[in-house]
Image (cartoon, rainbow, N blue to C red):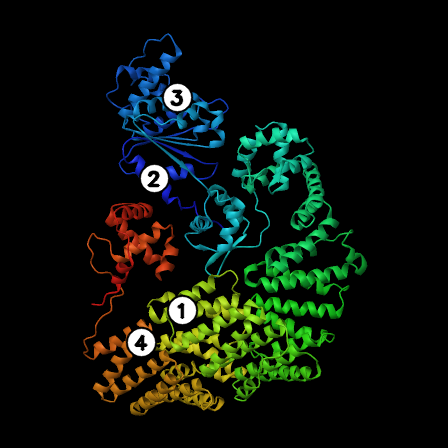
């Protein structure tokens, strides 16, 4: 896995604007300061490399122990003018011969020696100033001025004293090292005569800017907010450290792409990049003994500590600690954090120092730190666990780490809890906590595995690939012969729940079924597991198998004295029968009541069960009753104390919104849900599906169909059968038939028809049934189509399921239209539309009415047919189904109708002026958004955003996106809300 050649320049808008303004308006002395890797040189080069028509002399001071006098300037001039000496030099230029021996035959004759070194230096500076004038240098840049020789800095002081000669000087340096360069201090501390002094102090990147920087290294793709925050925390937002860490992570394959974003695998500490390590160790070698010992101690402690703690852990006196602190602070590695507390400026710097120590000394310091923390703050479990482990005291580490995992679980820090528990399960110790001494190692492993399973279950989707590691760890515990059958059964159940939450649903059912025989000691858990197995969502399992588990669950609940088991079985019965298309389920729903005198656990079980029933009711089309179930679940959510109950209702409400035509804001809301770190894998896919359906109805182009096909396949991979998973195939089958491709439609509908028939859940197929019948009929398989429609009609109950009733009418209309009974087909389409309107499902209603209009035209009733189609087009467009509206508009034009075109594709002629959309894009670029982020804000593709940017840059006569945004901002051209609205004008 590799990343791009280099990251793009991100952030720093204010600094860029300041630098551009100052160097473009007369002479200025611009001082750019910041720590190593903060981006000083990158900022300057970003601005000046875009400064068209300006001559820039780049001078860089190398980190030499004995720098060559004027070396940076000489090297810069050689690079600027390698092959020629500028014309018109005065005899004074003869002083340049020692600096440029390769120009000796082209320079004026040598000058006579002067009596003093000062006079000689002054003459040399005059000659260099003349050379800079003849080379027409507009900007002189000295990078890393803290390493520059004194003569180079005195040359700059001389240029500044003369007012710069209408030339700007830009100096970059590290503030912590100015004390070692007195001439630099004189340069930066005085306001120059005739020049403006501008100071730019660069700070760290924000989390958002860190994400943008990392995303640019992956070709502009998104990175997860969690990944960006992780890197910002570990690198303190230093761009060079971010870049180097990302490269290391990519080389180790610790970053993976999932759900359209780059995310990190679970990591402990980052490896220190070589560039960061070498820079820190170079500074460390210049620090005397006591200061170095104090820095090593601060690196081991890793958190802000006062002088007394530093002295005690380092094994030095308070007086020595005071001296060492002064040295460490002056070196720029340590900083004060709060009154009297000190810590490393950057975590990676501390890590580099810690790793440079001999192992024996590092362990000694960790042991001392553990002792100090145990006395000072015995509840600082994370610190105590860390220092005990690093000191090699594994028994103490086990006690502290498990206690820390318990605290993390209670506080919702599932990631940290999982990390600790995996470490504990992977460690065999002779000296273990007291409870382990009593119960033995098997009890310890069972206890830890149980906590791990709970942490993974509640951590869910945000844990990423760590789930696989946790599954393997728990499987090893279950296989341990020291773990009894009962304990193994509970662990296997927990394992199934983990797999379910992580999206491995087929594997979860395998664990559920295997664990029931081992749960005889826990009838409540056995019954809940049976309820899960009763849900008819396992591909390949016939309905009878699920009904068998439902029957066992009901018998089990009748014998068990458990309120929440009775609640779970009641809702499981209703949900199972609804999904199987059994109308008796509605009577079961009427018998569901809120349990009395119960705690949060029972409320959570009841609320979750009601949501399952509501989801199972969706295929029936009885939406008011579905909403009633959602309201009943919502009433329980505060008592349930289970935030996932609330999250579950959001997807059901969103599915209802898709069916009922409440599309406003649905696509962006689903995008946010899909992108959230805590959203489960399955729920994120369903959110992507619903958002894709809305976009597919409104936008033309293959991207939406590709996205829906991808989501459909990923849902299949999860190993769960459910009605919502058929929605993308409905969309794709309908598009294939609209394109006149019956075989492509059959490729979509036939596999789903076979799966539904095998499972016996025909109600799920209601939306696909008319499409499948039409694809068969168009493929000259009329008899098969009729047989299929007959089987479907007999399997569902149209009188009780409005969706089934609408589908049966549509199936009849399809067959009648194929037989050229257009009058009969028109009536059947109208009947279907009436059913859809009553549910309501406006999108399906309008597509059925389209069939009415089409049949009326074919029946010679042109006026009636055109009237229906005009109304359908208007309503489809208002709904948001612009793509379907366009299709009907084409039919109307073919019939000679004068149809008003809605301007969507292409752009009006704006000449050299920016279009409203170009101004919108530039406004987002000015905010620091990447092309992909701007595309998401505007609901465009990144490629389209790129085209708008290219057009804007051409009109503004600039060559970079940043320059375009800056130019547009300065000219007051950035889009307003009213401007944006004008882009949708109809013509």
Per the model, the C-alpha gap separating discs 2 and 1 is: 41 Å
Residue neighbourhood size for the residue with mark 1, other residues' Cα within 10 Å, grouped as few (<14), some (14–19), many (≥20): many
| Quarter where residue 539 is shown | bottom right
Residue nearest the viewer, comparing 639 with 933: 639
Whether residue 521 sits left or right of residue 285 in the image: it is right
Q: Secondary structure at mark 3?
A: helix
Residue 615 visible in the picture? no
Q: What residue is pinned by disc 4?
A: 876
Percent position (x, y) of residue 344? 57, 39
Q: Secondary structure at mark 4?
A: helix
**In this rendering, the label closer to the viewer, 2 or 3:** 2
Percent position (x, y) of residue 384? 68, 47
Per the model, the C-alpha gap separating discs 4 and 2 is: 51 Å
* Residues tagged 2 and 1 counted as in contact (Cβ below 8 A): no
Residue nearest the viewer, comparing 176 with 893: 176
| Quarter where residue 932 is shown | bottom left
Whether residue 140 sits left or right of residue 788 in the image: it is left
**In this rendering, the label closer to the viewer, 4 or 2:** 2
Q: Which mark is residue 124?
A: none
């Amino acid at each position: 896995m590799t990343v791009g050649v280099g990251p793009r320049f991100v952030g720093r808008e204010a600094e860029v604007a300041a630098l551009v303004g100052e160097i473009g308006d007369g002479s200025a002395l611009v001082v750019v300061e910041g720590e190593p890797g903060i981006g000083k040189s990158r900022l300057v080069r970003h601005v000046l490399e875009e400064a068209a028509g300006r001559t820039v002399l780049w001078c860089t001071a190398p980190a030499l122990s004995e720098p060559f006098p004027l070396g940076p300037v000489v090297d810069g001039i050689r690079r600027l003018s390698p092959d020629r000496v500028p014309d018109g030099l005065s005899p004074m230029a003869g002083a340049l011969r020692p600096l440029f021996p390769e120009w000796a035959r082209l320079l004026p004759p040598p000058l006579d020696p002067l009596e003093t070194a000062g006079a000689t230096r002054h003459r040399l500076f005059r000659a260099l100033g003349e050379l800079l004038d003849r080379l027409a240098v507009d900007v002189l840049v000295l990078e890393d001025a803290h390493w520059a020789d004194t003569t180079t800095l005195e040359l700059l002081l001389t240029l500044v004293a003369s007012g710069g000669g209408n030339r700007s000087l830009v100096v970059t340096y590290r503030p912590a090292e100015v004390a070692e360069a007195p001439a630099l201090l004189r340069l930066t501390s005085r306001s120059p005569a005739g020049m403006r002094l501008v100071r730019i102090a660069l700070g760290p990147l924000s989390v958002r800017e860190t994400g943008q920087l990392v995303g640019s290294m992956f070709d502009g793709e998104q990175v997860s907010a969690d990944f960006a925050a992780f890197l910002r925390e570990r690198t303190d937002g230093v761009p060079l450290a971010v870049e180097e860490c990302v490269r290391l992570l990519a080389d180790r394959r610790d970053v993976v792409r999932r759900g359209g974003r780059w995310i990190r695998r679970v990591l402990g500490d980052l490896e220190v990049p070589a560039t960061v390590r070498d820079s820190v160790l170079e500074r460390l070698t210049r620090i005397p003994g006591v200061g170095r010992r104090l820095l090593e101690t601060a690196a081991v402690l890793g958190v802000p500590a006062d002088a007394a703690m530093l002295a005690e852990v380092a094994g030095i006196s308070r007086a020595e600690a005071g001296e060492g602190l002064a040295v460490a602070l002056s070196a720029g590695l340590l900083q004060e954090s709060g009154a009297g507390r000190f810590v490393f400026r950057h975590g990676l710097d501390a890590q580099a120092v810690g790793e440079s120590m001999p192992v024996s000394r590092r362990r000694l310091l960790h042991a001392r730190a553990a002792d100090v923390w145990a006395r000072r703050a015995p509840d600082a479990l994370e610190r105590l666990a860390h220092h005990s482990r690093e000191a090699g005291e594994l028994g103490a580490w086990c006690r502290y780490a498990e206690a820390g995992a318990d605290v993390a679980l209670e506080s919702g820090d599932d990631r940290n809890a999982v990390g600790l528990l995996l470490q504990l399960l992977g460690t065999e110790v002779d000296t273990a906590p007291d409870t382990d001494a009593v119960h033995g190692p098997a009890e310890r492993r069972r206890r830890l595995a149980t906590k791990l399973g709970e942490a993974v279950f509640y951590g869910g989707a945000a844990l990423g690939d760590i789930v696989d590691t946790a599954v393997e760890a728990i499987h090893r515990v279950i296989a341990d012969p020291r773990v009894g059958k009962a304990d193994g059964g509970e662990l296997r159940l927990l394992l199934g729940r983990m797999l379910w939450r992580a999206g491995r649903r087929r594997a979860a059912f395998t664990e559920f079924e295997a664990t029931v025989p081992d749960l005889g000691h826990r009838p409540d858990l056995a019954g809940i597991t049976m309820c899960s197995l009763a849900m008819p969502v396992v591909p390949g399992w016939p309905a009878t198998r699920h009904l068998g588990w439902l029957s066992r669950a009901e018998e089990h609940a009748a014998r068990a004295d458990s309120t929440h088991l009775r609640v779970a079985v009641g809702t499981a019965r209703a949900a199972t029968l609804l999904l199987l298309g059994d109308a008796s389920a509605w009577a079961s729903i009427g018998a569901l009541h809120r349990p009395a005198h119960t705690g949060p656990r029972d409320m959570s079980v009841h609320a979750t069960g009601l949501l399952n029933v509501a989801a199972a009711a969706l295929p029936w089309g009885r939406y008011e009753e579905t909403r009633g179930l959602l309201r009943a679940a919502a009433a329980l959510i505060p008592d349930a104390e289970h935030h996932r109950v609330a999250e579950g209702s959001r997807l059901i409400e969103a599915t209802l919104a898709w069916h009922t035509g409440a599309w406003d804001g649905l696509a962006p809301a689903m995008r946010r849900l899909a992108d959230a770190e805590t959203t489960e894998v399955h729920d994120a896919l369903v959110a992507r599906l619903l958002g894709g359906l809305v976009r597919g109805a409104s936008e033309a182009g293959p991207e939406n169909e590709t996205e829906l096909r991808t989501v459909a396949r990923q849902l299949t991979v999860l190993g769960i059968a459910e009605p919502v998973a058929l929605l993308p195939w409905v969309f794709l089958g309908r598009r294939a038939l609209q394109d006149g491709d019956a075989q492509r439609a059959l490729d979509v509908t036939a596999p789903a028809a076979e799966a539904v028939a095998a499972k016996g859940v025909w109600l799920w197929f209601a939306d696909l049934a008319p499409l499948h019948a039409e694809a068969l009929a168009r493929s000259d398989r009329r008899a098969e189509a009729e047989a299929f429609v007959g089987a479907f009609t007999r399997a569902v109950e149209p009188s009780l399921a409005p969706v089934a009733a609408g589908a049966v009418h549509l199936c009849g209309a399809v067959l009648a239209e194929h037989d050229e009974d257009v009058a009969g087909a028109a009536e059947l389409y109208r009947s279907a539309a009436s059913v859809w309107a009553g549910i309501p499902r406006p999108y399906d209603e309008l597509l059925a009415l389209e069939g009415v209009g089409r049949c009326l035209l074919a029946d010679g009733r042109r006026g009636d047919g055109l009237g229906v189609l005009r109304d359908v087009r208007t309503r489809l467009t208002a709904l948001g189904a612009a793509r379907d509206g366009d299709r009907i508009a084409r039919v109307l034009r073919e019939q000679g109708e004068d149809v008003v075109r809605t301007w969507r594709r292409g752009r009006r002629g704006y000449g050299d002026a920016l279009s409203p959309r170009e101004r919108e894009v530039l406004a987002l670029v000015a905010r620091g958004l990447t092309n992909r982020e701007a595309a998401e804000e505007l609901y465009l593709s990144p490629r389209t955003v790129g085209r708008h940017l290219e057009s804007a840059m051409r009109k503004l006569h600039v060559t970079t996106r940043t320059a375009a945004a800056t130019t547009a901002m300065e000219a007051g051209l950035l889009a307003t809300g009213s401007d944006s609205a004008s882009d949708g004008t109809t013509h």
